[in-house]
């Protein structure tokens, strides 16, 4: 039998242990949010900001704490001043150096590491684009922390949700690293609004690291159509079109009739019907337009992972059992070689 004093001491000890085991209280979580600070990596090309990269600012707002944007390249001060007007951004740092114009990760990673250390940032966000996917693993390795890829939502300052198995399963991950290096699925985080912000603009640290890679050149196909990744309407073609000639005959006129970007399934790209820059899917681009209209696409898991967040999905396929109809809002079971030309003519009128 314990004495009254001993029982009181035991109760106090038990209460202390239980409190230590409980999750952080709302007050503690608020304190963590105040201590958090985000570095949003912003993409620019030829002095023009990539609007989808402002998703990093939206993610920073969900974490809480201060948000700083960073942009690098030649003559980027005007881009920095544009970002300064974005809601939620407290500061924008820019690095004027043409070595960063092409976004080569070998050059860009040391630059980011220096500025992350200087700013003591707890979170670093970038879009899950070709730029972000090649850059962020290098940054994580240099900082000796783990990268968290392609997140869809933020639960708290250290807990994130991301898809696995081509989107067929959703994983919640928690990171104990002091710096969270994260890429975002930009279709899940809308770009932060511009117009009412008044952030300060200052020059960042440029390590001027010795270049280990060289930009040789690029071949760009110019088009008046909207950019696939950010278009509000997308028309996609699949293997059901049977040849590149049929793809070019049917898909571009349909896209032009509604002012849409052109996409393609992996099967169509692998068959040579379309360029790989048009591929939609897990190994291509993620799109979330207002309208996704596809023809001759069966709906493989890999393709669905890249377009199932579209607001309205319309599909044309002659196979009534095609998986695409399971996610489509509107479906037409018909021969696309008859249906697409007829639809195109009616849309033109």
Image (cartoon, grey):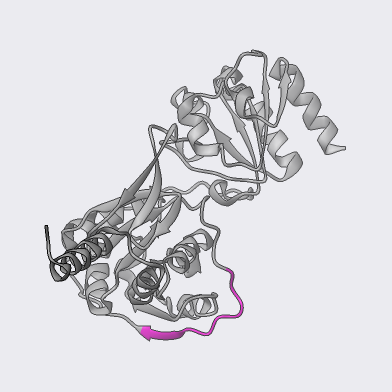
Question: In this rendering, is residue 253 above or below 325?
Answer: below
- Which residues are the magenta region? 193-202
Residue 154 seen anywhere in this rendered image of the structure:
yes
The quarter of the displayed image where residue 59 is located: bottom left
Position in image of residue 318 (x %, y %) = 67, 14
Using the rendered view, name the quadrant where residue 291 is placed.
top right
In-image side of 209 versus 282 (left or right): left
Q: Position of residue 225 (x, y in %)?
A: 63, 48
Quadrant placement of the C terminus = top right
Please state if 201 lies on the left or on the right of 111 as rendered: right
- Location of residue 33 in the rendering, given as x and y in whole percent from the top left corner: 38, 71
Q: Is residue 102 above or below residue 47?
A: above
On screen, residue 131 above or below 64: above
Q: Is residue 194 magenta?
A: yes
Q: Nearer the viewer, residue 220 or 83?
A: 83
Question: Please, what is the dominant secondary structure of the magenta stretch?
Answer: loop
**Can residue 73 be seen?**
no
Instruction: Determine the residue positioned at 22% across, 74% down.
Output: 117
Q: Quadrant of residue 302?
A: top left
Task: Please name the residue shown 26% across and 76% down the image.
Answer: 120
- Identify whether 157 is placed above or below 334: below
């Amino acid at each position: 039998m314990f004495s009254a004093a001993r029982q009181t001491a035991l109760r106090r000890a038990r209460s202390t242990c239980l409190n230590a085991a409980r999750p952080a209280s709302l007050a503690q979580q608020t304190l963590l949010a105040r201590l958090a600070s985000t570095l949003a990596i912003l993409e620019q090309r030829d002095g023009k900001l990539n609007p989808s990269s402002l998703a990093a600012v939206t993610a920073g707002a969900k974490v809480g704490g201060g948000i700083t944007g960073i942009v690098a390249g030649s003559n980027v001060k005007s881009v920095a001043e544009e970002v300064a007007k974005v809601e939620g951004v407290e500061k924008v740092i820019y690095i004027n150096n043409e070595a960063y114009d092409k976004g080569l990760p070998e050059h860009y990673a040391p630059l980011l590491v220096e500025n992350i250390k200087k700013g003591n940032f707890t979170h670093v966000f970038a879009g899950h684009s070709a730029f972000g996917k090649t850059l962020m693993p290098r940054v994580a390795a240099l900082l000796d922390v783990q990268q968290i890829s392609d997140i869809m939502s933020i639960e708290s300052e250290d807990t994130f949700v991301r898809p696995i198995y081509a989107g067929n399963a959703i994983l919640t991950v928690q990171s104990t690293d002091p710096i969270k290096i994260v890429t975002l699925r930009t279709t899940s985080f809308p770009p932060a609004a511009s117009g009412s912000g008044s952030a300060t603009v200052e020059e960042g640290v440029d390590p001027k690291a010795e270049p280990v890679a060289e930009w040789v050149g690029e071949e760009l196909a110019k088009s008046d159509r909207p950019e696939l990744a950010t278009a509000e309407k997308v028309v996609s073609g699949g293997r059901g079109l049977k040849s590149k000639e049929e793809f070019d005959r049917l898909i571009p006129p349909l896209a032009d009739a509604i002012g849409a970007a052109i996409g393609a399934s992996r099967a169509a790209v692998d068959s040579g019907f379309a360029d790989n820059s048009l591929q939609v899917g897990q190994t291509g681009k993620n799109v979330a337009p207002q309208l996704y209209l596809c023809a001759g696409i069966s709906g493989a898991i890999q393709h669905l992972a890249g377009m199932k967040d579209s607001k309205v999905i319309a599909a044309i396929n002659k196979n009534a059992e095609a998986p695409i109809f399971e996610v489509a809002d509107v479906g037409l079971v018909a021969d696309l070689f008859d249906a697409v030309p007829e639809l195109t003519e009616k849309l033109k009128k």
